[in-house]
Image: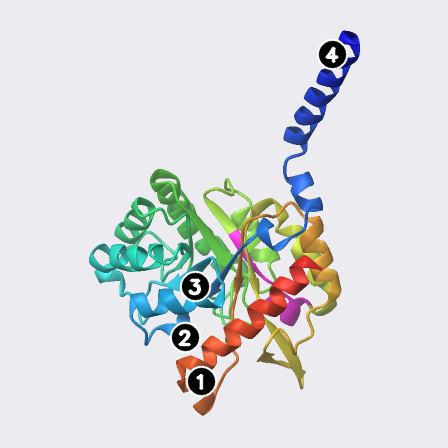
Amino acid sequence: MHAMNRRQMLQASLAASAAVGLGSSLAAQQASPSRWKLITFTKFLQPLSYDEMAERVAAIGFEGIEAPIRTGGHIEPENVAEELPKFVEALKKQGLTIDILTSSINSIDSPNAEETLKVAKELGIPRYRMSYYKYDLKKPVTRQLREAGAQLKDLAAMNEEIGIQAVYQNHSGSHYVGAPVWDIMQLVRQYDPKVVSMAFDIGHARVEGNTSWPIQWNLVQSHLGSVYIKDFKGNGGRPAWCSVTEGELPGEFWKLLKASDYNGPISLHVEYLHGEEAKQVSNHIAAMKRDLAWLKQKLAS
């Protein structure tokens, strides 16, 4: 009996060790909404006070936010030291956090870059979304990519010193560095993912990658810092952004997400209301609520 107990104890120990070794692989098999922190981009809630925004977002059911702390955002860069602690405190009262600080920063020379990141770090904000690098198509693309790489090198060094992670979002369009993903990953992969990573936007990846977006998804796995959810309908070769409940996100994306090792934040972007409809905060709140319910269902199924 004692020998059997020892065997059982050894097997339990080995199983525990294997679980530790597998780590994220086990997490990948346990696909449920709790595996990822579900947050939302609050660009369209800027007319609200900090407390009002926190109350509304918490009531919808999000666990955190992606907050534009940039020129024209919730907080202007020069006011970060004074205002960001107030914003974080208002969110904290509702059990929310800022999981991604959306910035205007793409170099160490960006306005108030170092101060913004230091304040964010002190307040427990783990990552920030960089501003974009852009191409001038009248000039050689490869030379401009090297120039962007030089800026990113200095920024990565500052990130490492401060202890914060930058994420770079792939965007669609002929002037964006990162639209094809291959170009920006040449730069990002040179750094520890804790310092510089990718914010993979499946909507923009599908616009640019059409049926080849799984290649882009595969490419970013080593440096995946966040996942952005948005969708569109075809519109004569151009995207017509829409609710995820009405779009064309392929089932394969959800399978690949669940099978991956990724367990970080998933940010839902509601950027498809226009005209008079977009002027009312209540319309954006309703869209967020509808789309979050759909997203939770997709992640749980």
Give the secondary structure at mark 1.
helix
Q: Which residue in the structure is indicated by mark 2? A: 44
Q: How crowded is mark 1: few (under 14 residues within 10 Å), some or many (20 or more)?
A: some
* Marks 4 & 2, CB-CB < 8 Å contact: no
Q: Which residue is drawn at 59% across and 68% down?
A: 293
Q: Residue at x 68, y 33 (%)?
A: 22
* Marks 4 & 3, CB-CB < 8 Å contact: no
Residue 282 figure quarter: bottom left
Q: Which residue in the structure is indicated by mark 3? A: 58
Amino acid on which the number 3 mark rests in the picture? Ala
Distance between the alpha carbons at the discs numbered 1 and 4: 66 Å
Q: Which residue in the structure is indicated by mark 1? A: 278
Q: Which of 289 and 275 is in front in this view?
A: 289
For marks 1 and 4, the one nearer the N-term is 4
For marks 2 and 3, the one nearer the N-term is 2
Question: Where residue 6 is drawn, which disc sits there?
Answer: 4
- As for residue 200 lying within the magenta part, the answer is yes
* Segment tinted magenta in the rendering: 198-209
For marks 1 and 2, the one nearer the N-term is 2
Q: Can residue 95 be seen in this view?
A: yes
Q: Can residue 203 be seen in this view?
A: no
Give the secondary structure at mark 2.
helix
Amino acid on which the number 2 mark rests in the picture? Phe
Distance between the alpha carbons at the discs numbered 4 and 3: 49 Å
